[in-house]
Amino acid sequence: MDIDRIVRVDLSSGAIREEQAPSRYEILGGRALTAQMLLDETDARVHPLAKDAKLFIAPGLLGGTAVTTSGRTSFGFKSPLTGGTKEANVGGQLGHRLARLGIKAIVLEGTSPDGWQRLDIDNDGVRLSDASNLAGRSNYDLHRELVGEALNTRAAATIGPAGEHRLSSASVAVTDPEGRPTRHAARGGPGAVMGAKGLKAIVVDDDGAPRVVPGEKKDEFRKEVTKFSKVVLEDPRTHNLNKTGTAGVVKFVNRDNVQSMPTRNHRHGTWSLADTISGQEIDRLGQERGGKMLPCMAGCVIKCAILFNDEHGQHVTSALEFETIALLGSNCEIGPADAVAELDRMCDDIGLDTIEVGNAMGVAMEAGVLPWGDFEGAKRLLEEVREGTPLGRIIGNGTAHVARTYGIDRVPVVKGQGLPAWEPRTLKGMGITYSTSPQGADHTAGMVTARGATADTLVKQSRHEQLVMMAIDSVGVCQFSNALPGDMATFVANRFGIDYDDGKVLEMARSGIDAEREFNRRAGFDKGDDRLPAWLLDEPLELPDGPGTFDIDDALVDAVWSS
């Protein structure tokens, strides 16, 4: 089946229409497609929650195929957090199902005048219907009803109470392979945009839909699938991820010469109790409680999702990842692992970005709203978000909003978005990515964890990794597959029967980033927005070889996209 349908849903009128994707979008998918469509169709000056704002949802170019990890989905929109372009990338079961139904993109526009709606997509068509019975309900409850036992064909994308309240840290929860809402399009506030449209849930069922089968080069495609899976399986990084997930890096980043374990609102880079929330400790608990490692989408051979059970062997979360552990854990001085897992489940249920909320709570603790390490207080704050109280709305609207409300000037954001765990004062390449990515402070925009490299080298690495990540998000595979531009080019060439090489992959990626940068320019951004907060330049971390600050010259930062 060709993936060439664009489904347009106008929530204002209830009209649904389908069209064939124009030829200029033919070899665009995922993030590159949502970035270009956002630029083409949205006035960059529009309020992110206005009816004229749009939300674009697109599987990658390899969605629906047997390529391992190829089921990721991009949500593209103008962010209520940053005021600029944003893409939130998510695993789970949605991407494969959309692709198998031949859908290249869904475009959501307008605002429902008649209360909450749900969108159903299956082999019989696309339908909007009343969802008043879903109003106010949280994600675990929603996915039990909307997906139920139909795990083999059905997936949902839902907003929890945070999305209904249109809070800027609200996520969209996507069904994982076990039917749970543990995969989230989280960063930048896509849940708020979906909530502003009055859309509570999208349910996709590919029962009866034909498989996505490459054309004339199907034999070559299948051979490459097998070859690539073998390479991924034999990669030592895969073995590490399959043992402890991304949580396995805690011990490494908590070392004195790395200091990338944010603590007390990023004031320190290590935490004395980090071992209690480490991947090794989580693995030990898992062996006692029946925990295991899972894929976050069908067909993934990496299996880095941690199924975490409580002391009674009952499921708590399947998404206990490093960023969540660091921002909800050490950043707020909350532990041990059971406490962080409970907060993570609450965020999944309410529909919140754990990175943004962990930063927001850290700023709130700095303001004296809660004492450091107050686990019960943190739970109460999340319940306030669920209920939409004034305090809950302050927290749920993100880090910068909390700082403005309480008069805190030490704000861990870039372009309005909360810092991930990777520390830019020691891992300076990450600081370059945070500064120059159109997405703001997003570690998945381009991971550069080298230490000791020259500033020129770090600039080149950041540029390259940002391009590679744009490509990865556009073909729809996971960054942990470590797919190279050549790998992606081979798959795309054989999938679509075209001439395609690694140079064209990087050209596509550069065009995608240029589209994001142009949207931001139209929205009023300039090079002054490509800067880290001043305290990262002025407040040193005490490293074994001396004080560490982000000391990359502005001229070098400005040169990232000048060539």
Image (cartoon, rainbow, N blue to C red):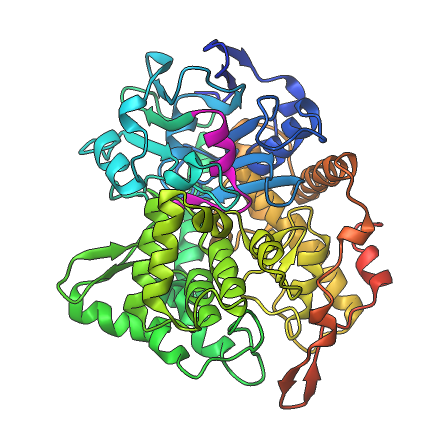
Q: Is residue 152 visible?
A: yes
Q: Quadrant of the N terminus?
A: top left
Relative to 159, residue 234 above or below: below
Instruction: Check residue 329 for magenta coloring.
Output: no
Image quadrant in which you'd find residue 258: bottom right
Above or below 225: residue 39: above
Front-lying residue, 199 or 97: 199
Instruction: Say left or right for 397 vs 321.
Output: right
Look at the image and give the residue range highlighted in magenta. Answer: 183-198
Is 208 situated above or below 81? above
Residue 203: image quadrant is: top left
Whole-percent x, y for residue 434 in the image: 66, 57
**Residue at image coords 61%, 24%:** 26
Percent of width and height locating residue 313: 14, 61
Q: Which residue does the image show at 50% across and 40% down from the upper left?
A: 476
- Looking at the image, the residue that sits furthest to the left is 312
Residue 182 appears in the picture as rendered = no
Total marks in image: 0
Q: Position of residue 174 (x, y in %)?
A: 37, 39
Instruction: Give the quarter of the image for residue 20.
Output: top right
Residue pictured at 31% horizontal, 62% vertical: 341
- Residue 377, placed above or below residue 486: below
Q: Residue at x 16, y 57 (%)?
A: 314
Q: Position of residue 321 (x, y in %)?
A: 40, 60
Left or right relative to 327: residue 154? left
In this orientation, which residue lies closer to the viewer: 319 or 403? 403
The verdict on residue 195 being magenta is: yes
